[in-house]
Image (spheres, rainbow, N blue to C red):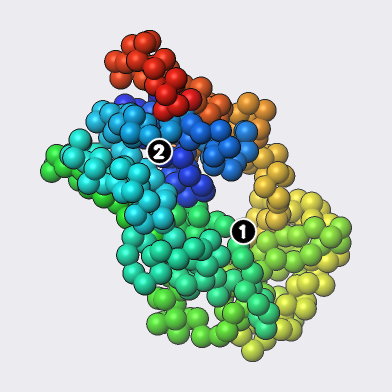
Amino acid sequence: MKPGPLSGLKVIELAGLAPAPFACTILADLGADVIRVDRAVPGEDVLGLPDDPLTRGRRSIGVNTKTPEGVELVLTLAEKADVLVEGFRPGVAERMGLGPEQVRARNPRLVYGRVTGWGQDGPLAQSAGHDINYIGLAGALEPVGRAGERPVPPVNFLGDFGGGGLFLAMGVLAALYERTSSGQGQVVDASMVDGAALLTTQLHGMRAGGLWQGERGENLLDGGAPFYDTYQCADGRYVAVGAIEMRFWAALVQVLGLDAEELPVHLDQREWPRLRAILAEAIGKHTRDELVAKAEGTDACLTPVLSPWEAAEHPHNAARGTFVDVGGVVQPAPGPRFDRTPPATPGPPPQTGADTSAVLAELGLGDERIAALREAGAIR
């Protein structure tokens, strides 16, 4: 049994892209036994990388769910599972014969987690889309960018991962907790629009309180404030400054060698353009690492802007083991941390279908039955 707080939890993952795999990665990282149902028909595998960290730490079986035998295998797996996760468009799983009613008829205690862009219902439910479309509709894309310029896509962090996979994983765990009292599973409908909208909760409060009144790039936390922004250094690299509170602002002024008495009040929005020019000039005199060294040990809230690849080498991240090497690929470690049931370093991504025979043997299928399924094209 795998270590971690979810040790003993059994999860069936119907292979998909981005949010659903990320939710299952979180569950697998924390100790769940995740069995990924990959496609068994050659040429129909979900696009992905051979060493994709989003498939780490689980087993893979190759099943042709276009055959009755393949569908029956997945239903049999679900009979002994706690969770099933899918990320198809609404109605697809039902047409496969693997929708919530069909699966939970075999296992009423099963938590059925599903993630889509728009949700299972609503006018756009059947429309195509990607992260950028979902966060645009949720109000999470519009605030990201410079004043007077177009919104900038924040990679696909907000929709696919924060508002999708993480949102779904939280919902699954909540449903599992509720099951301890009711004894029943339920369907978790995680929409990336809903999840991304939830991530904007603070902005709605700030607007209601008068703290978010400007357009994009003109407010406290969107780069509008000169003391909460990024700046280019002499070597072309960048630092992040987040000196909002007075004591942090005072520390930053000292690190930069500025005279506090000659500076405008940093919270006076009318003075922000002048203050930004002063900070840009002071920061631009130093290389990134020189400035970071000056700020180290202070409360100046000045840190380097690191690439994802540099981040793994930073002393703080190295000391905490924030990144791990899995099969030669450096990637983020499982989280959060637990003092009694810490998860292990994840195993590498499985080869598609590598665990088919072993998993089916665990279900009680004999060698002859497994060979017959393989001959019929139901498994890979």
Which amino acid type corresponds to the residue marked 1 in the rendered image? Answer: Val
**Outermost residue to the bottom:** 270
| Residue at image location 44% in from the left, 55% down from the top | 164
Which amino acid type corresponds to the residue marked 2 in the rendered image? Answer: Lys
| Front position in the image: 343 or 67 | 67
Q: Gap in Å between the C-alphas at discs 1 and 2? A: 34 Å
Q: Is residue 340 visible?
A: no
In the picture, the quarter occupied by the N terminus is top left
**Residue 316 bears which disc, if any?**
none
- Quarter of the image where one finds residue 379: top left
Q: Is residue 44 visible?
A: yes
Q: Quick check: marks 1 and 2 in contact, CB under 8 Å?
A: no
Residue 2 position (above or below residue 233): above
Q: Position of residue 255 (x, y in %)?
A: 73, 62
**Residue 155 bears which disc, if any?**
1
**Outermost residue to the top:** 367
Tell me the residue that label 2 is attached to.
66
Q: Is residue 368 left or right of residue 325?
A: left
| Residue at image location 45% in from the left, 26% down from the top | 377
| Front position in the image: 106 or 315 | 106
Q: Position of residue 365 (x, y in %)?
A: 32, 15
Camera-side mark, 1 or 2: 2
Name the element at disc 2: loop
Q: Is residue 202 left or right of residue 309?
A: left
Residue 17 position (above or below residue 81): below
Name the element at disc 1: loop
Q: Position of residue 6 (x, y in %)?
A: 35, 32
Instruction: Looking at the image, tell me whether mark 1 or mark 2 is earlier in sequence order.
Output: 2
| Residue at image location 74% in from the left, 53% down from the top | 292
| Residue at image location 14% in from the left, 39% down from the top | 183
| Front position in the image: 3 or 106 | 106
